[in-house]
Image: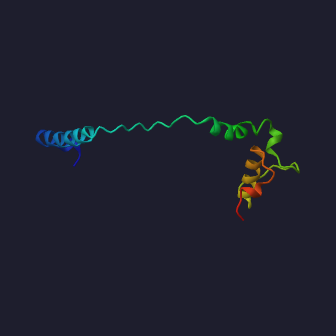
Amino acid sequence: MKLTEMSAEELASFKAEVQKKYDDFKAQGLSLNMARGKPSAEQLDLTEGLLTAVKSSEDCFAEDGTAPTFPPENELKIAADVFATAVKLASAEKLLAE
């Protein structure tokens, strides 16, 4: 039943029921801080290459000068190549378990 369709007595009963549930949760003394923590220096260092990988529009082209069209058939390999380049890995093969 919608709240707008309840009588005054039904609303009072509903309020008491909900208030009891709220008070029960509050009595548990939970600390539910859902904020995410700050990243460590190591985590920041790991991602720094990703933030600076694309410096100009030329960085968006393959070595042969072509721009990829999506969705490519081998999109995982392309993504791994881009990531490997960004984190300065010699080969994307280390990222892919083929």
Residue 87 horizontal/vertical position (percent): 74, 44
Residue 41 in the image: above or below residue 21: above
Residue 60 in the image: above or below residue 73: above
Q: Answer left or right for 65 relative to 32.
A: right
Dividing the picture into quadrants, the one containing residue 8 is top left
Display colour scheme: rainbow
Q: Residue at x 58, y 36 (%)?
A: 39
Residue 95 horizontal/vertical position (percent): 71, 56
Identify the residue at the far bottom of this view. Answer: 98
Residue 41 horizontal/vertical position (percent): 63, 35
Residue 34 horizontal/vertical position (percent): 43, 38
Q: Residue at x 73, y 53 (%)?
A: 80
Q: Answer left or right for 19 relative to 39.
A: left
Q: Residue at x 83, y 40 (%)?
A: 58
Identify the residue at the far left of this view. Answer: 9
Q: Residue at x 70, y 62 (%)?
A: 97
Front-lying residue, 50 or 68:
50
Dividing the picture into quadrants, the one containing residue 29 is top left
Q: Quadrant of the C terminus?
A: bottom right
Front-lying residue, 60 or 51:
51
Front-lying residue, 18 or 50:
50
Residue 54 in the image: above or below residue 69: above
